[in-house]
Image (spheres, rainbow, N blue to C red):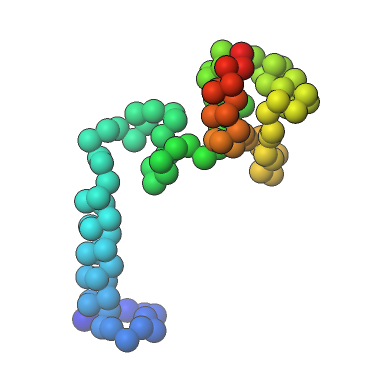
Amino acid sequence: MHNNPLPILIPYEPDVFWEGIRKIVRDELSKLDLSKPANSSDSEVLGFASKPLYKISEICNLFGITEPTVREWVKNGILKQIKIQSRVYFLHDDVQSLLKSGMK
């Protein structure tokens, strides 16, 4: 047992607790597909089936348009923006429905 300056308030010895945590982390990491590099695709987010939010630059790339066009779409209600602090994002479902509609 280690001499920890702060006691851990759980019903396990610290060594047993930390070994359990390490086992959980190892198990979760073994479930991940690490064969692809972390930045293999901008449309993938670790832990999500699809990217939940898109930045304005990603919308431009997806549709082959400029930022002023994206802002015009927002103004005209074609695409709904989500503001998080001072940043603007677009929801995955909104982007996918716009892609399916063939909007360009």
User: What is the tally of numbered marks visible in this picture?
Assistant: 0
To which quarter of the image does residue 38 belong?
Answer: top left
| Quadrant holding the N terminus | bottom left
Tell me the residue at 54%/35% (across/down).
92
- Relative height, residue 16 to residue 84 (above, below): below
Q: On the picture, is 45 further left or further right than 57? A: left
Image coords of residue 21 (percent x, y): 28, 67
In the figure, 99 relative to 19: above or below? above
Give the residue at x 41% y 34%: 44
**Residue 94 visible within the image:** yes
48 displayed left or right of 52:
left
Determine whether, in the image, residue 2 is placed left or right of residue 73. left
- Residue 12 lies, with reference to residue 85, above or below; the image says below
Image location of residue 73, percent across then percent down: 72, 22
- Dividing the image into 4 quarters, which one contains the C terminus? top right
Q: Residue furthest bottom?
A: 11
Residue 78 placement (x, y as % from top left): 71, 25
Asked if residue 57 can be seen in this view, the reply is no
The picture quadrant where one finds residue 83 is top right
Residue at position x 44%, y 29% in the image: 42
User: Which residue occupies 56% across, 36% down?
Assistant: 93
Residue 53 location in percent, x, y? 55, 37
Please state if 71 lies on the left or on the right of 35 as rendered: right
Q: Is residue 79 above or below residue 82?
A: above
**Residue at the limit of the structure toward the right, as seen here:** 75
